């Protein structure tokens, strides 16, 4: 499998279960690749929606993707603290074109004060019926919600303060070196 190098820019594409392109992020900087994960950053990154609408991210965000877990994590660095947006999604794949995953609608948001909220349950139920998600996918996703909540409670991986600090500092070093 293709693995981008540190400092390289990649495109990220999310799809829906039926294969339609959902959203694209251009020029996300890779901070680290390993055998199973990729850590990247978005900072004022162009995002294109499936309907053609375009917008730019507002603040730096550290991105965590894993090829075994059915979720990815976006740690948004905001003035009031770090907020997390966690997508329940297929494990990523990557090729020369983009890092790709299937977005399964359910999201967990973690606010700077630690409050957790499960989002988009109705959208998930609607798409599960419309796109005929297999029962096995439904079971995997429910188990992964539990795993994700455990990571959040135990401040594991991208939910540790050190994770955000280390990778934001690395991003600052890389951008300074490029100037």
Image: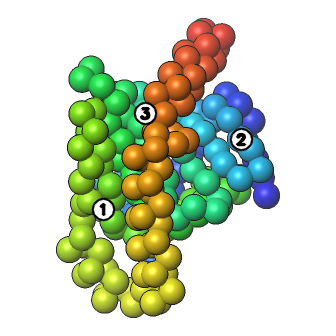
The colour scheme used to paint the residues is rainbow
Q: Is residue 29 above or below residue 65?
A: above
Decide if residue 149 is on the left or right side of residue 67: left
The C terminus sits in image quarter: top right
Q: Residues within 10 Å of mark 1 (few under 14, many from 20)?
A: few
Q: Residues within 10 Å of mark 2 (few under 14, many from 20)?
A: some
In whole angstroms, how far apart are the C-alphas of marks 2 and 3? Answer: 17 Å
Q: Give the residue number, with chain letter if any, for mark 2.
A: 33
Tell me which residue sits at (52%, 64%) in the image. 70
Judged from this view, the residue extending furthest toward the front is: 154
Quadrant in the picture for residue 138? bottom left
Tell me which residue sits at (57%, 22%) in the image. 166
Q: Give the residue number, with chain letter if any, for mark 1.
A: 51
Q: Position of residue 1 (x, y in %)?
A: 79, 58
Q: Mark 1 or mark 2: which comes first in sequence?
A: 2
Q: Give the residue number, with chain letter if any, for mark 3.
A: 61
Quadrant in the picture for residue 133? bottom left
Give the SS element for disc 3: strand
Q: Position of residue 123 (x, y in %)?
A: 24, 72
Give the SS element for disc 1: loop
Between 35 and 26, the residue placed more toward the observer is 35
Decide if residue 25 is on the left or right side of residue 35: left
Camera-nearest label, 1 or 2: 2
Q: Position of residue 18 (x, y in %)?
A: 45, 81
Tell me which residue sits at (25%, 81%) in the image. 126
Q: Mark 1 or mark 3: which comes first in sequence?
A: 1
């Amino acid at each position: 499998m293709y693995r981008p190098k540190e400092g390289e820019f990649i495109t990220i594409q999310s799809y829906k279960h039926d294969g339609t392109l959902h959203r694209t992020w251009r020029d996300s900087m890779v901070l680290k690749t390993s055998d199973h994960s990729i850590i990247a950053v978005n900072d004022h990154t162009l995002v294109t929606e499936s309907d053609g609408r375009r917008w730019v991210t507002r603040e730096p965000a550290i991105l965590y993707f894993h090829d075994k877990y059915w979720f990815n994590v976006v740690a948004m660095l905001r003035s009031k603290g770090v907020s997390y947006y966690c997508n329940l999604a297929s494990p990523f794949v990557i090729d020369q074109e983009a890092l790709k995953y299937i977005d399964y609608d359910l999201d967990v948001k973690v606010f700077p004060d630690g409050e957790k909220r499960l989002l988009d349950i109705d959208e998930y139920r609607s798409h599960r019926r419309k796109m005929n998600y297999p029962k096995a996918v439904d079971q995997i996703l429910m188990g992964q919600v539990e795993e994700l909540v455990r990571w959040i409670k135990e401040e594991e991986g991208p939910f540790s303060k050190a994770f955000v600090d280390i990778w934001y500092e690395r991003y600052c070093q890389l951008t300074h070196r490029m100037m």
